[in-house]
Image: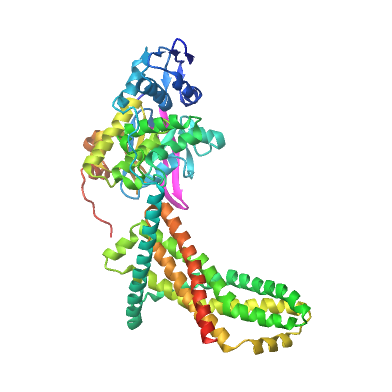
């Protein structure tokens, strides 16, 4: 390609392909209306070449001469294309627009959560009255996936947390000569707070997200619509078994995790020379039934919350692959947020009850 | 626009999933510039054959040559050059939902060419204008109809000016009018740009409208039952399977 900006003459070479066009695209800025383009040597033009030619004649108003008929024919379909792109569909990107949309989305979400809780309660009561309505087979499979398969990760996390807490507490307590109280600290913290919370967080990450992704993909594939039009309630078919599984599995996992956590603490203490019997006596004297019960009550609620919010996010899924990803994220985030929120409420209640 | 040379050559291709052989040693050619249609009943291996042709599945035996190069053994730069020679439209369109139609078309150009952004955008607009969607360049796939999504998918497949376009069931799920529009588009791209088409279809009306040559696959024969122009197969083929397909005769549903 040979361009002389002064005399406004442009002589095209033999090939006008993507490589050539990417080198000479910026020349277009210097082309004026009076430019004469000699295309007599041009033999090959690909999509990018055609775009270059089209831009020369339609956007710059240059005159192209000597164009071979076969290339002119390739340009013909674009005769009617407007020189400038059409208006993009209106999307309000202003600050106010975004704040408005976000607020509206938040309100809508709260409304959906409330109606979800209502619908779920109604269905759950119905299932309570007629247990045959529950899909028990699905429930056990889900319980296995959410529970048994989580044993290793929940156990490891808790065991290591118990060890870490014991290590951290041993040093300052030793300064006061009361390092046996490490047992009280580890056991109470694990049974009342850490055990239930960590188990619920593991559940939110493993199963809440899985529920959201599974139900979300079903929503995208219109499987939820199919259930509804067959007269089968997705709430009863999909949500109840999952929430029930969460309800059953979480407390069991919590006990298991708490026990392992205390074992971790014991291991550290025994490594520092305490006999097992002394630790055991300390443990029994420190931990009361109310401590175990607080942990249990919480874990039942956490199980319902994590499984429920996972299902809700799945059902709220919009269109396409991105939407499934968003639902999964939202399931985990909402799950963890709810766990902490409800735990704070419980802390207040148990404080007042002096448990 | 059929010229003499072959653009795709299939030699003794065997398609199998594990021990289950779907197609047994089939051979055929696709000539440069023709509209080549693969037909056959459900489960006869049409879509599998297509996956072999575009290199998504390695053949169990035999070879597939595109422009003289074996697609299943090509690696690295060779494979990249080969892939740029063809575009694929998947049955559902498979547009990227998070990108606008224009961005869908520009994606491959971004990766494979050095064109500046405004040049890419203009090329994308031109491709979309070829399929009549220039006004919808800034729309997201979810904001346009199913037929438009398929046309946009064709525009995306053409982004790098491929010599061959593979279309998987272009008329599936479209109304007859939209489907006829798509047929007209195929013919115009074939005539005006000389693009070779390989189409998997079982829409009779569409086959008569666009096909230069048809092969019919069969699941019992595990191979090609018939080959020829659609009119030939309709009027002159003696095979009862081919006859039934082209005359829309119901066959007994196996129990």
Say which residue appears at 38% left-offset and 66% top-offset.
A110
Nearest the eye: B190 or A171: A171
- In the figure, residue A236 lies in which quadrant? bottom left
A161 relative to B81 in the view: left or right: right
Say which residue appears at 41% left-offset and 40% top-offset.
B104
State yes or no: residue B16 in magenta. yes
Say which residue appears at 30% left-offset and 61% top-offset.
A225
A282 relative to B142 in the view: left or right: right
B173 up-or-down from A21: above or below? below
- The range drawn in magenta is B5-29
Q: Position of residue A284 (x, y in %)?
A: 65, 89
Q: Position of residue B151 (x, y in %)?
A: 32, 39
Q: Position of residue A199 (x, y in %)?
A: 55, 72
- In the figure, residue B207 lies in which quadrant? top left
Image quadrant where one finds the C terminus of chain A: bottom right
Q: Position of residue B33 (x, y in %)?
A: 36, 28
State yes or no: residue B149 in magenta. no
B143 up-or-down from B33: above or below? below
Type of secondary structure dominating the magenta stretch: strand
Say which residue appears at 63% left-offset and 77% top-offset.
A260
B169 relative to A4 in the view: left or right: left
Nearest the eye: A266 or A41: A266
Nearest the eye: B193 or B17: B193
């Amino acid at each position: 390609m040979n361009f002389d900006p002064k005399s406004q003459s442009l002589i095209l070479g033999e090939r006008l392909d993507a490589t050539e066009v990417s080198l000479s695209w910026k020349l277009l800025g210097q082309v004026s209306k009076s430019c004469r383009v000699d295309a007599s040597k041009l033999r090959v033009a690909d999509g990018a070449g055609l775009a270059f030619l089209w831009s020369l004649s339609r956007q710059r108003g240059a005159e192209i001469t000597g164009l071979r008929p076969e290339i002119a024919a390739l340009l013909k379909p674009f005769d009617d294309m407007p020189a400038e792109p059409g208006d993009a569909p209106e999307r309000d990107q202003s600050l106010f627009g975004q704040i408005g949309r976000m607020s509206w989305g938040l309100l809508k979400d709260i409304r959906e959560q409330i109606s979800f809780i209502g619908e779920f309660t109604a269905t759950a009561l119905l299932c309570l009255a007629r247990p045959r309505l529950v899909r028990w087979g699905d429930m056990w499979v889900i319980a296995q996936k959410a529970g048994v398969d989580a044993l290793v990760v929940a156990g490891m996390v808790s065991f290591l947390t118990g060890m870490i807490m014991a290590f951290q507490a041993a040093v300052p307590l030793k300064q006061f000569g009361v390092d046996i109280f490490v047992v009280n600290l580890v056991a109470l913290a694990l049974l009342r707070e850490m055990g239930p919370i960590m188990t619920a967080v593991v559940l939110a990450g493993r199963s809440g997200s899985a529920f959201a992704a599974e139900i979300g993909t079903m929503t995208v594939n219109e499987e939820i619509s199919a259930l509804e039009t067959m007269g089968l309630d997705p709430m009863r078919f999909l949500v109840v078994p999952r929430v029930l599984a969460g309800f059953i599995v979480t407390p069991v996992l919590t006990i298991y995790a708490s026990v392992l956590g205390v074992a971790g603490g014991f291991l550290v203490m025994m490594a520092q020379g305490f006999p097992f019997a002394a630790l055991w006596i300390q443990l029994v004297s420190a931990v009361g039934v109310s401590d175990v019960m607080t942990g249990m009550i919480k874990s039942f609620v956490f199980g319902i919350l994590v499984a429920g919010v996972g299902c809700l996010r799945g059902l709220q899924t919009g269109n396409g692959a991105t939407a499934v990803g968003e639902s999964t994220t939202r399931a985990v985030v909402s799950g963890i947020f709810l766990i902490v929120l409800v735990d704070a409420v419980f802390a207040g209640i148990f404080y007042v009850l002096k448990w | 626009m059929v010229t003499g040379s072959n653009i795709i050559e299939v030699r003794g291709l065997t398609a199998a999933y594990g021990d289950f052989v779907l197609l047994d040693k089939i051979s055929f050619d696709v000539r440069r510039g023709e509209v080549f249609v693969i037909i056959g009943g459900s489960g006869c291996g049409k879509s599998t054959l297509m996956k072999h042709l575009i290199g998504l599945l390695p053949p169990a035996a035999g070879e597939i040559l595109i422009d003289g190069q074996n697609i299943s053994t090509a690696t690295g730069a060779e494979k990249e050059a080969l892939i740029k020679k063809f575009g694929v439209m998947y049955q559902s369109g498979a547009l990227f939902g998070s990108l606008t139609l224009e961005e869908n078309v520009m994606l491959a150009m971004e990766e494979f060419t050095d064109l500046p952004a405004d040049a890419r955008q203009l090329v994308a607009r031109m491709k979309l204008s070829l399929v009549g969607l220039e006004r919808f360049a800034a729309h997201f796939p979810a904001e346009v109809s199913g037929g438009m999504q398929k046309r946009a998918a064709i525009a995306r497949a053409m982004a790098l000016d491929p010599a061959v376009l593979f279309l998987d069931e272009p008329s599936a799920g479209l109304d007859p009018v939209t489907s006829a529009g798509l047929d007209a588009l195929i013919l115009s791209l074939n005539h005006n740009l000389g693009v070779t088409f390989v189409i998997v279809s079982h829409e009779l009306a569409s086959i008569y409208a666009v096909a230069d040559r048809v092969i019919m696959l069969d699941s019992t024969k595990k191979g090609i039952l018939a080959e020829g122009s659609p009119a030939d197969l309709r009027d002159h083929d003696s095979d009862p399977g081919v006859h039934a397909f082209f005359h829309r005769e119901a066959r007994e549903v196996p129990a």
